[in-house]
Image (tube, grey):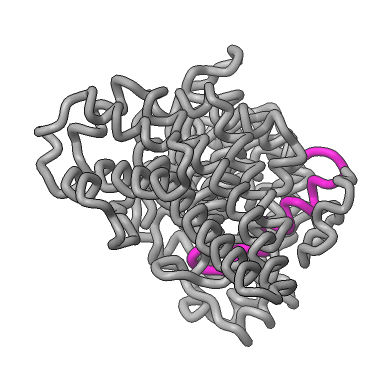
Amino acid sequence: AILSASPFRRPFLPSSACIDVETDAMADEPASAYSDEEFTELLGFLSDPKMEVQRFAAEGVLAQTESPHFLEYCRRQPRKAARPLLRLAEKAEAENATSSAAATLAADGAKTSEQAKAARQAAVEAVAASAAGSSALQALVNISTIPTVRDELVELSAPRRTAEAMKGGWLEGRSGLAHWYAMLLANITTAKAGQEALCADETMLRFLLAAFISKPRPPARTGYEDPLIFLGKVIGNVCALEAGRRTLAGGEQGPGTVAAIVNELADRPRRHDVMSALRNLSLDNECHPAVVAADPLPSMARFLYPVDKASAEQRAQLPEALGAALAADGAALTGEAPVRLAGAFCILGLCRTREGREYLRAAGACEVVRAWKQEESEEEVRSVLEAAEPPLTSTEEELEAPQEGGCQGLMADVDEAVDKATGPTWSAPDRPDGSTERPLPKRDEAAEGEGGDMGGLFDHIEGAEDLGKPGR
């Protein structure tokens, strides 16, 4: 099965206290007191001509997403819930851009009291549009954990529309709603249909990756030190699909793209999602050239190699540059078991091709695995490392030997270890769970969270120029 981040849901409350009596009462009353007709009526206000009404309705809907009764309504009536919220989120982004521009223009040219009043009105409308869009997006994030709503969102082209809305704001210097867009995309892409929808537009997918790796990052906001961290889940989910892996790791841009992903391992909060993406890529033999060119092992060794537990003679088995770097900067075995498991699968996956094995040996993987295995406390991780060790310590001649213990022996053990954790061998077309070929990793249940020339799209994003270049 594939690795996809699990959908996540956070309890959200209206951010504004300016809720009229009817909406406020509906939020406070027990949700069981309301019928389907009343929920439908509330959702209908999302399409009201007045932005203030839309704003209050969005905040009311957001409050209701904490109610199991409303969530059950959404499960049975996914389009009635998803469609108006998605439309409002799109409209609010556009309205916010228009009103903000109008407010700036009016303020700069205001010479009379009437012009000043117009400027203030435009500013108020911009604030209302932003608040309405924020509430609508938060509500969508919550209800997108419901499978029927998630699937309906895909039918409504939400992956493309959400990414386009995020891109539109990004290119105009707005990122205030970026974290909600990223969370929504992360939830939608937990299913194969959502992954396929995003992979269908390579330009948009590359924009999301460029936004994820961009420097400097958007400013922190309350509760979200890294607003774009959720795009890591989106990238990992997309890499669960063959089309996504081919887009990111294939062609001339593949090595540079994978290297850009590897560089994010230095950011500890992003590490889990990045390792999930690398695990998917490493378990796909066709992606090995790009992964090898990206040289991920030195970055991984910093949190997978217990340097203090190794003797000087053992550390001398590492490449000189890596040994010196680890001695100077330090390295330790991370306490995050999911990260260690993903790292073990990265190494095991690369062991399945000669190119991968030769890279690992030259990069010092034999010593990294030896020291790591001695300190590993999780049996599942140890079993993966034990399966990877023989191909690493054997020569290619030994692996190619036809007798017992050669290719049919050692490499069969590697395949068996992969199959045991990811499912049986098969060669059928894509399965409903999104698998595309053996071996691909299983769905990641540990990711429960707190996501060619493109006409100059990335010209103002630092680091984007490296997407098409090989290297670390």
The residue located at (19%, 43%) in the rendering is 26
The residue located at (30%, 27%) in the rendering is 40
Asked if residue 156 lies in the magenta stretch, the reply is no
**Residue 461 point in image, percent of width and height:** 77, 63
In the displayed structure, would residue 446 be above or below residue 439?
below
The residue located at (26%, 33%) in the rendering is 71
Q: Which residues are magenta?
A: 250-271
Depth order, front residue of 472/92: 92
In the displayed structure, would residue 434 be above or below residue 251?
above
Depth order, front residue of 303/222: 222
In the displayed structure, would residue 428 be above or below residue 159?
above
Asked if residue 255 lies in the magenta stretch, the reply is yes
Depth order, front residue of 116/42: 116
Can see residue 3? Answer: no
Is 214 on the left-hand or right-hand side of 446?
Answer: right
The residue located at (72%, 58%) in the rendering is 172
